[in-house]
Image: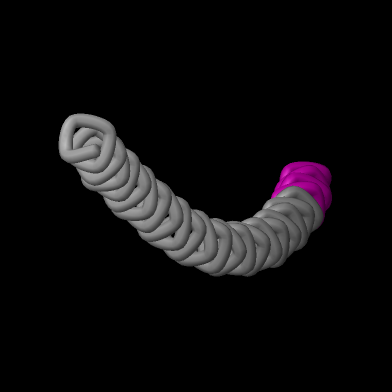
């Protein structure tokens, strides 16, 4: 009779341990789901920031190209103007 009572106690303890493990597993699964959600949100934010950064690089490159173009045109204008002035000086 005492053995039966001891086995029942062991079974109750094992059931309690099992329930504790199940609770831990549920909690771990919930934490994992939250971490995955945070990860996905951060990945999305990083993708948005990367896209904005790429656009700013393209815009910056376009501004640099425009500046170079205007600089070359200005240099050419000064060269042409210098040639015209020299021609007039020598022509007079």
- Residue under the image location 61 percent in, 64 percent down: 45
Q: Residue at x 29, y 52 (%)?
A: 73
Q: Position of residue 21 (x, y in %)?
A: 69, 52
Q: Residue 66 vs residue 82: left or right?
A: right
Q: Residue at x 80, y 48 (%)?
A: 13
Quadrant position of the C terminus in the picture: top left
Residue 41 vs residue 47, the one in the foreground: 47
Which residue ends up furthest to the front in the rendered image?
92
Magenta highlight on residue 49: no
**Magenta region, residue range:** 1-14
Q: Nearer the viewer, residue 12 or 36?
A: 36
* Residue nearest the observer in this picture, 81 or 91: 91
Count of residue discs:
0
Colour scheme: one colour
| Residue 2 picture location, percent across and down | 82, 44
Residue at 73% x, 53% y is 24
Q: Quadrant of residue 62?
A: bottom left
Q: Look at the image and tell me whether residue 61 can be seen.
A: yes
Q: Give how far across and how far down residue 84 sits, in percent.
A: 23, 45
Q: Is residue 83 above or below residue 5?
A: above
Describe residue 59's horizontal placement relative to residue 31 as left or right: left
Inspect this view and state whether residue 1 appears.
no
Between 12 and 72, which is closer to the camera in this rendering? 72
Q: Is residue 70 above or below residue 92?
A: below
Quadrant housing residue 39: bottom right
Q: Main secondary structure of the magenta part?
A: helix
The location of residue 65, given as percent across then percent down, is 32, 52
């Amino acid at each position: 009779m005492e053995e039966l009572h001891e086995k029942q106690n062991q079974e109750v303890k094992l059931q309690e341990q099992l329930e504790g493990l199940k609770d831990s597993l549920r909690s771990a699964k919930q934490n994992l789901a939250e971490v995955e959600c945070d990860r996905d949100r951060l990945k999305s934010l990083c993708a948005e920031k990367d896209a904005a950064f790429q656009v700013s690089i393209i815009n910056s490159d376009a501004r640099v190209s425009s500046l170079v173009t205007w600089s070359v045109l200005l240099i050419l204008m000064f060269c042409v103007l210098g040639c015209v002035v020299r021609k007039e000086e020598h022509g007079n």
